[in-house]
Image: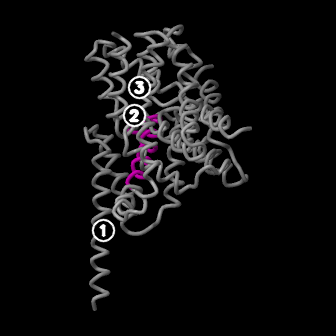
Amino acid sequence: MIYLDLLIGFLEVGFFSFGGAYAAIPLIRDVVQSRGWLDDEMLSYMIAISESTPGPIMVNMATYVGSLKGGILGAAIATSAVVLPAFLIIILIMVVLKKLLQNKFVNAALSGLKPCIIGIILSTGIMLVIKNCEISSSETMNVPAICLTAVMAFIYFGSRKLLKNGISPIMLICISAVVGIIAYGI
Amino acid sequence: MPLLFELFFTFAKVGLFTFGGGYAMLSLIENICVEKKKWITHDEMMNITVIAESTPGPIAINCATYVGYKQGKMIGAVLATLGMVLPSFIIIYVISRFLDRFLEINWVASAFQGIKMAVGILIIDAAVKMLRKMKKKPMQIIIVVCSTVAMIIISVFSLHISSMILMAVAAIIGITVFMIKEKAGKEMSKR
């Protein structure tokens, strides 16, 4: 039955997808293709959709596949299945968190983990900017993209320095969408 | 506004503006939940990020569940998580049913070109904020530099190495340094 299949398939994705959506894509590919839900081309299209619409990428993929295979009920089941493991794990951790944080070995591990994760996030941001601007080779370098990114970064960080509240991240997203439409759409 | 409604609508807003995965959303959550509403502290935010990274599932869900549970126990957790998921659920459902060639719509594609730039900036912003508040001891600085360089190398050469391995190594380094320090401390006190 498709509903049960969606439930099990996306519970699997939710339980084993460590390290964010991009790390989880091979797992999702495996789950989706072993059941014959999507071919490779459809999968890449769906990843692109999930990236360019709001919301967590993994959740978007679950909703999309669920909806294609089982309508609104399928979408609801697949989405709940992908969310449930993360939800339960966090509740579980919160219940024992205070005790956990008192443990000196947990704290020692955290002291190494925190800077490592900052590094991972920082490099992800840097790589994304490099990829968007295609800086990697001088021939393909996307000069307009570099300029626009620089201007937006300047406005965003500048406003935070000068004004008390500055431009909020949501505001930046809105501005960037308008900038994109003006720069590329017209 | 009652707290439970506020949790739901706040995370619905975060969900609606989360583009390009969880890292960019960290800036949004920090801005709303730490700076504006003061639901959690920056330290807690850092802890959530670590927990979210070391447990399965989308980071956005981990964050919503954590903040929701802290502010409103079980019901809060359910509402915050539901709020996070609902906007994208509706949008994706509509796209999957009615818009066959969503990405080929001209203005959608160009708006997303712009948003991609903002996402890069927001991710770097999240990292810089964390970096500023990090304890700057030699071990921490070395790990930040090494993991940044390692991740860039991994993605430039598209190596199949999971960031989980880096995190495992970093945790082991943290514990080892702690044990060495503790041992050194004991020997000092013996003398």
- Report the Cα–Cα distance between label 2 and label 1: 33 Å
Which residue position holds label 3? A81
- In screen coordinates, is A8 left or right of B74? left
- Which numbered tag is attached to residue B177? 1
Q: CA distance from mark 3 to mark 2?
A: 7 Å
Residue A18 percent across, percent down from the top left: 34, 39
**Residue shown at 42% from the left, 63% from the top:** A102
Chain of residue at mark 1: B
Few, some or many residues within 10 Å of mark 1 (<14, 14–19, 20+): some
Which range is magenta? A116-137
Question: In this figure, which residue is indicated by the disc labeled 2?
Answer: A85
Taking the spot 61% from the left edge, 27% from the top edge, the residue there is A183
Q: The residue under label 3 is which amino acid type?
A: Ala
Residue at 31 percent across and 45 percent down: it is B164
**In this rendering, position of residue A125 left or right of residue B106:** left
Query: Residue B104 location in percent, x, y?
Result: 51, 13
For mark 3, name the chain: A
Main SS class of the magenta portion in the image: helix
Q: Residues within 10 Å of mark 3 (few under 14, many from 20)?
A: many
